[in-house]
Amino acid sequence: MNGDGEGGYWLCHVCELKSIGKSRVCAACFKTTCDKHLRHVTAYNPATGLYELQPICLHCAIESSL
Ligand SMILES: [Zn+2]
Ligand SMILES: [Zn+2]
């Protein structure tokens, strides 16, 4: 589905940087994001009733701060 087969490289959807290895995804849009464009923000999780740190990409961070 998302380049999970041979090669195993992925692209950051913000800067299109190609990396190999374990990919990280945004918790909001589920797109692959590099470390530079992923930040951990505190978000309320209604399932647990707790505030939790979640990895959010730059795009979603900007949208949620509007
Ligand atoms: Zn990036
Ligand atoms: Zn996102």
Image (cartoon, rainbow, N blue to C red):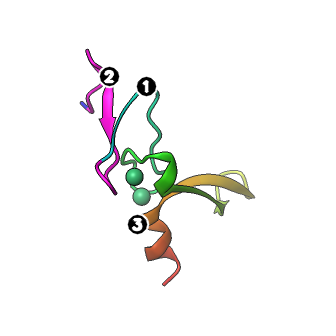
What residue is at 45 percent from the left and 64 percent from the top? 58
Secondary structure mostly seen in magenta is loop
Residue 8: percent from left, percent from top: 32, 22
> Cβ(mark 3) to ligand 2 < 8 Å?
yes
What residue is at 44 percent from the left and 46 percent from the top? 34
Secondary structure category for the residue under label 2: loop
Which residue, as the protein is rendered here, is positioned at the far right?
Answer: 50
Residue 55: percent from left, percent from top: 56, 52
Residue 59 badge: 3
* Front residue (pair 40, 15): 15
What residue is at 40 percent from the left and 66 percent from the top? 59
Residue 60 magenta: no
Instruction: Measure the C-alpha gap from mark 3 to mark 2.
Output: 24 Å
- In the image, taking residue 7 as reference, residue 40 lies left or right, namely right
Secondary structure category for the residue under label 3: helix
Instruction: Measure the C-alpha gap from mark 3 to mark 1.
Output: 23 Å
Amino acid of disc 2? Gly
Residue for badge 1: 21
* Front residue (pair 62, 21): 21
- In the image, taking residue 11 as reference, residue 63 lies left or right, namely right
Range shown magenta: 2-16
Residue 9 magenta: yes
Residue for badge 2: 8
Residue 18 occupies quadrant = top left
